[in-house]
Image (cartoon, grey):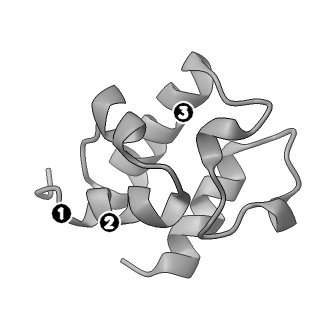
Amino acid sequence: MELNNFVEKMADCFNQTEASEITPSTRFRELEEWGSMMALIVIAMIDSDFNKTVDADDLKAANTIEELLTIVQNKPTN
């Protein structure tokens, strides 16, 4: 799983944030549009695009998009 691809997929989840603002170091939970619905969208994207299952605790454990990718990479494939 490539970092740039993951960042691009994350950027696609955020409708109100410019894609250029989404980088590996973006603290995604600090974005204005982050909330419970956005968390569900990200969880669904990871499941459908990467065939991995993450939960709310995984999202809370990651501060940046790059940290979230590391968590996803360490998950077993569904």
Q: Nearer the viewer, mark 1 or mark 3?
A: 1
Residue 35 position, x and y percent, is: 63, 22
Please state the horizontal and vertical placement of residue 10, each as a whole percent of the image: 60, 55
For residue 23, side relative to residue 66 (left or right): right
Give SS at disc 1. Answer: loop
Residue matched to label 1: 74
Q: Residues within 10 Å of mark 3 (few under 14, many from 20)?
A: some
- Which residue is tagged 3? 41
CA–CA distance in space, label 1 to label 3: 20 Å
Residue 55 in sight in this render: no
Q: Is the residue 21 above or below the residue 41 in the image? A: below
Q: What is the number of the mark on residue 70? A: 2
Please say if 38 is above or below 71. Answer: above
In which image quadrant can residue 29 be found?
Answer: top right
Classify 52 as above or below 73: above
In the rendered structure, which amino acid carries the disc numbered 1? Answer: Asn
Instruction: Give me the residue at 44% from left, 81% from top.
Output: 2
Tag 3: residue type?
Ile
In front of the other: 34 or 25:
25
**Going from the N terminus, do you reach mark 3 or mark 2 first?**
3
Asked if disc 2 and disc 1 are in contact, CB closer than 8 Å, the reply is: yes
Residue 37 in view in this figure: yes
Packing grade of label 2 (10 A; few <14, some 14-19, many >=20) is few
Q: Quadrant of residue 32?
A: top right
The image shows residue 73 at horizontal and vertical percentages of: 26, 66
Q: Nearer the viewer, residue 54 or 77?
A: 54
Say left or right for 53 vs 44. left
Residue occupying image coordinates x 36% and y 77%: 1
Q: Are marks 3 and 2 in contact (CB under 8 Å)?
A: no
Secondary structure of residue under mark 3: helix
Q: Quadrant of residue 7?
A: bottom right
Q: Residue at x 64, y 67 (%)?
A: 8
